[in-house]
Amino acid sequence: EVRLVESGGDLVQPGGSLRLSCVASGFTFSVYDMSWIRQAPGKGLEWVSACNEGGGSTYYAESVKGRFTISRDNAKNTLYLQMHSLKSEDTAVYYCAIPKYVTHYSDSDFRRAPHGNNIWGQGTQVTVSS
């Protein structure tokens, strides 16, 4: 059974930093693309970032480029999201996710909102507020 467990969310002031982690189990982590998705209060799901199985190829939403960095440690089955210069609009529940039916994302996946063709965890709350 696929299991994705996110952690690291917290209340942080604008301009602050956080690092989210996602520990994966139940599948061969090192062959899957991984992603971070978020859902802000009252809004739909939004792609945040993704990386390929080796971590060398990445995708970032325009809203987080230059502030967030995705990385992974395949030896630890763990995905990370380092977030800097946090803004109030980053407030959301953050989920890590994998494609449900394939091992890799395609560019077209990121041109529409995340949907049921992904498996994600229970999420971790990030609140940016003074």
Image (spheres, rainbow, N blue to C red):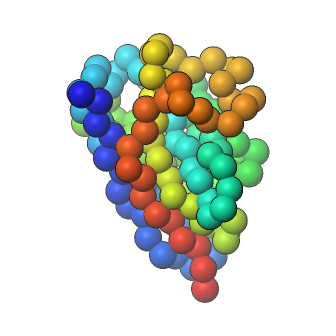
What is the residue that sits farthest to the bottom in this orientation? 130
Name the side, left or right, on which 118 lies relative to 43: left
Q: Position of residue 75 (x, y in %)?
A: 25, 30
Q: Residue at x 62, y 46 (%)?
A: 45
Count of residue discs: 0
In the picture, residue 100 is in which quadrant? Answer: top left
Q: Residue at x 53, y 30 (%)?
A: 116
What is the residue that sits farthest to the top in this orientation? 102
Q: Residue at x 69, y 65 (%)?
A: 89
Q: Is residue 52 visible?
A: no
Q: Position of residue 61 (x, y in %)?
A: 70, 42
Seen from the viewer's position, the closer of residues 25 and 79 is 25
Q: Position of residue 40 (x, y in %)?
A: 62, 59
88 w.r.t. 114: above or below: below
Name the side, left or right, on which 14 lies relative to 117: right
Q: Residue at x 29, y 42 (%)?
A: 23
In the picture, residue 47 is in which quadrant? Answer: top right
> Split into 4 quadrants, where in the image is the N terminus?
top left
65 w.r.t. 89: above or below: above
77 w.r.t. 6: above or below: above
Name the side, left or right, on which 85 lies relative to 77: right
In the picture, residue 19 is in which quadrant? Answer: bottom left
